[in-house]
Amino acid sequence: MDKAQFEKLTKDYQQLQEQLRNLALQREQFAMQNEEYKEALASIQASAGKIYYAVGGALVESNKDAAAKDIKEKQESLELRLSIMGKQYEELSKREQALRTEITNALKATGAAGPAQ
């Protein structure tokens, strides 16, 4: 493997690591949002009075069933996105491991001195 190929390989590896970090952060944010939806549903179910929820920058009055239905739909959509992200993360992790192995093998083949000039 020559130097240009090795540099491309390491650049691809670094980009993949960045994608994994970004995806992990998104998953964490979505998981927190999912927990907020669960708490909101519990609050709605426990309420006996009027229900108000934010739509954009305004508070809108709603009945209990409509508010719960809206949050459940958002939660289902979010859970689907989390599932897709989980699969994407798995695939990227496999690619990252393969690239790491390829880089390690290239370094071993050159005596850990780096790729040929």
Image (tube, rainbow, N blue to C red):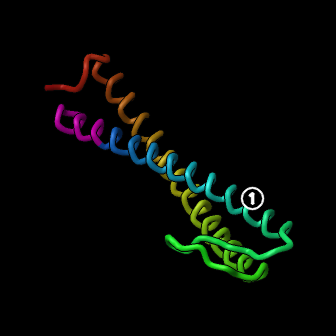
The correct choice, above or below, for 85 with respect to 101 in the image is below
Quadrant where the N terminus sits is top left
Residue picked out by circle 1: 39
Which residue is at the front of the view, 90 or 103? Answer: 90
Q: Is residue 71 visible?
A: yes
Q: In this view, does 110 lie to the left or right of 26?
A: left
Which residue is at the front of the view, 60 or 12? Answer: 60
Q: Is residue 9 magenta?
A: yes
Quadrant where the C terminus sits is top left
The correct choice, above or below, for 94 with respect to 54 in the image is above
- Magenta part, dominant SS: helix
Residue 52 lies in quadrant: bottom right
Q: What's the residue type where badge 1 is placed?
A: Glu
Which residue is at the front of the view, 96 or 20? Answer: 20
Read off the magenta span: 1-11
Q: Can residue 90 be seen in this view?
A: no
Which x, y percent locates residue 29? 55, 52
Which residue is at the front of the view, 42 or 82? Answer: 42
Question: Quick one: label 1, few (<14), some, or many (20+) residues within 10 Å?
Answer: few
Which x, y percent locates residue 82? 60, 60
